[in-house]
């Protein structure tokens, strides 16, 4: 659970999934069918969120494996090669979860009292943990695949030591500032105290340079 929780902390849009995680943790021993139901809902929710963000319309009443298959398509997984194998494996996990949920679910096909009492005993703890862990791995993979694909491109930060022309211009305009026994040049202060302002002024200076040079000629 920790890896999924950490992933959710890193990407706030998924914070609502904590409700599913709490239910899974709270029922994995006492009522596995309930834990499995929430594990299935967890994957479906992630898939639907990704498809919605990618403007991919899910088929009506799509099964869990159908949701995962379309989610992989929304993430741009190729229809052949390694990505196809990943997609097929994830879809198969979804299919198995759906089948198991129908087999042991408390409301699936109606149950006698004895059947309801015995449904949890049909799956041992080792198998339960494996199934839930597999679900969490898929959940983390889908979220990270989506977030990595949609990560904003960060502009390269200006290297102060290489912006000598602008630094000289700024220092000549505003000089040096003294604070007791310490003194700092204006460009250095601007760069370290308000980098965005430094970037704006640097861009304005760079754009104006060709005009200044043309005027000098």
Image (spheres, grey):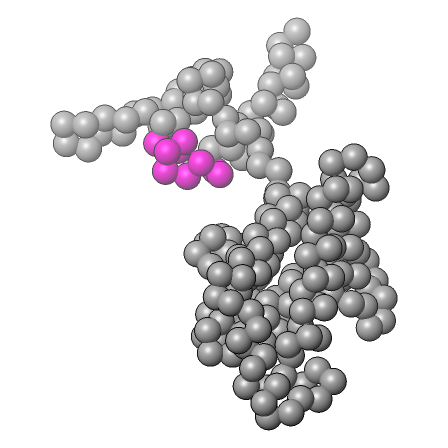
Q: Position of residue 10 (x, y in %)?
A: 49, 52
Q: Relative to 27, is 171 above or below?
A: above
Q: Looking at the rendering, in which quadrant would you find the C terminus?
A: top right
Q: Specify the principal SS of the magenta part.
A: helix
Residue 23 in view (yes/no): no
Q: Relative to 119, is 152 above or below?
A: above
Q: Which sits in the foreground, 59 or 192?
A: 59
Residue sitting at x 79%, y 50%:
73
Residue sitting at x 49%, y 61%:
126
Q: Does residue 71 appear to the left or right of 203 in the view shown?
A: right
Residue sitting at x 70%, y 62%:
96
In magenta, the rendered stretch is 189-197
Q: Magenta stretch containing residue 133, yes or no?
A: no
Q: Position of residue 214 (x, y in %)?
A: 67, 12
Residue sitting at x 64%, y 79%:
105
Residue 202 in view (yes/no): yes
On the image, which quarter does residue 186 sit in?
top left
Q: Which sits in the foreground, 177 or 120?
A: 120
Q: Position of residue 123 (x, y in %)?
A: 55, 69
């Amino acid at each position: 659970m920790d890896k999924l929780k950490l992933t959710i902390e890193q990407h706030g849009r998924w914070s609502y999934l904590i409700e599913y995680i709490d239910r899974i943790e709270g029922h994995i021993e006492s009522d596995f069918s309930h834990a499995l139901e929430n594990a299935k809902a967890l994957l479906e929710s992630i898939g639907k969120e990704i498809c919605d963000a990618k403007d991919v319309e899910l088929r009506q009443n799509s099964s869990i494996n159908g949701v995962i298959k379309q989610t992989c398509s929304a993430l741009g997984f190729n229809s052949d090669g390694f990505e196809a194998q990943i997609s097929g494996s994830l879809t198969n996990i979804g299919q198995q979860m759906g089948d198991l949920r129908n087999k042991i679910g408390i409301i699936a096909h109606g149950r006698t009292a004895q059947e309801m009492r015995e449904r949890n005993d049909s799956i041992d703890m080792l198998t339960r943990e494996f199934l839930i862990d597999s679900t969490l791995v898929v959940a983390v993979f889908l979220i990270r695949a989506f977030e990595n694909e949609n990560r904003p491109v960060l502009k390269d930060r200006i290297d102060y030591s290489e912006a000598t022309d602008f630094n000289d211009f700024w220092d000549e305009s505003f000089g040096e500032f003294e604070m007791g026994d310490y003194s700092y040049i204006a460009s250095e202060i601007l760069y370290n105290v308000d980098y965005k302002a430094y970037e704006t002024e640097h861009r304005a200076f760079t754009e104006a340079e060709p005009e200044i040079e043309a005027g000098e000629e």
